[in-house]
Image (tube, rainbow, N blue to C red):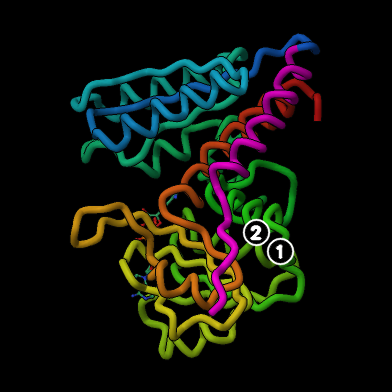
Amino acid sequence: MMTAQLIDGKLISAQIKEEAAKEAAQIKAKGVNPCLVVVLVGNDSASQVYVNNKKKACEAVGIRSVSYELGADTTEEELLHLVAQLNADEAVHGILVQMPLPMQINEEKVILAIDAKKDVDCFHPMNVGLLHTGGNGFLPCTPAGIIELIKRSGHTIQGQNCVIIGRSNIVGKPVAMLLMQENGTVTICHSKTRNLAEVCLGADIIVSATGKVNTVTADMVKAGAVVIDVGMNRNEAGKLCGDVDFDKVKEIAGAITPVPGGVGPMTIAMLMKNCLVAAKMQNNLM
Ligand code: NDP
């Protein structure tokens, strides 16, 4: 029986961060000090871990990071006021407001308030639009990380049948757009898709982003297919796992990402790249 190539997200993200560090040094040599501001509202423990990881990555790459930790009772007005100040501050190139936000704050309003040129998460409708029209701008972090994982592990996207399971705004839809721009033939599936297994069996590349354990089982995968697992779930034993039945699928797939250590580390690496894009765009260094 065949065992799939393991696509190592830790290794590939480390390569990307190393490249970003070299680029950050070049930007600094031109007199610009790239800076990311991360805003955390409330005390969600998962968000705190994400924010700390972002800080560490900034330090490793050589990007100045500033964080604002606001109380859970922060009002929408107070947060919007801070965003306006950061928008106006020329020393700040990237602004990231960690989601989810407490109930009293409208997330959409906050996303709209961030200057699109500083929107390193690529959530602002202007940047989402630019992504769809193929224009230059930021790339959404997790989807762009998925493309890098596929390409840097030696796989071609052009002409391949790509099946995405999940149609969210942060993963499914943008990953579909990026795979299409790479000349893949894209099918998007969701909870109302009929015959998901049959659709998946036609795929050369499967990207699963449902947040449901065992969405992809061995009988759904064609021999040799590339399987990218975006899901972050807990199994019955409380252990972190993805959407894919990893142990069985790896016997059939040609390549597969583990969870943890696959897509996860790529998101922050791509965020670092977006911060540098922001610093360059705002200083006419593109
Ligand atoms: P959402 O809950 O927003 O979207 C899930 C999507 O999966 C929906 O489109 C839903 O369909 C679809 N879906 C759910 N169950 C099924 C099913 N049984 N069959 C087919 N489709 C199904 O999730 P996100 O996109 O935000 O995240 C998905 C997963 O990826 C989560 O586990 C999340 O934690 C993880 N994630 C990981 C990241 C990383 O950096 N590694 C970053 C972002 C997310 P419908 O639209 O019909 O409801």
Residue 35: x, y in percent? 58, 18
Q: Count neighbours of disc 2 (C-alpha within 10 A) and say few if under 14, some if 14 to 19, many if 20 or more.
A: many
Q: Which mark is residue 155?
A: 1
State which quadrant residue 283 falls in.
Answer: top right
Residue 69 position, x and y percent, is 32, 20
Seen at 81% across and 31% down, the residue is 286
Marker count (numbered) = 2
Write the residue at 47% across / 15% down: 66
For the residue labelled by badge 2, is the local secondary structure a helix, a strand or a loop?
Answer: helix
Q: Amino acid at mark 2?
A: Ile
**Disc 1: residue Cβ within 8 A of ligand 1's nearest atom:** no
Q: Give me the residue at 54% from left, 18% from top.
A: 59
Does the magenta portion include 140?
Answer: no
Residue 73 locus on image (x, y percent): 18, 26
Check if mark 1's residue and mark 2's residue have beta carbons within 8 Å: yes
Residue 148 vertical position relative to residue 74 in the rendered view, above or below: below
Q: Gap in Å between the C-alphas at discs 1 and 2?
A: 6 Å
Query: Which quadrant contains ligand 1?
Result: bottom left
Dot 2 corresponds to which residue?
A: 150
Q: Amino acid at mark 1?
A: His
Circle 1: element type? loop
Residue at x 55%, y 35% (from the top left corner): 119
Report the span colored magenta.
1-28
x, y (%) of residue 272?
59, 31
Q: Nearer the viewer, residue 15 or 130?
A: 15
Q: Which is the main secondary structure of the residues drawn in magenta?
A: helix
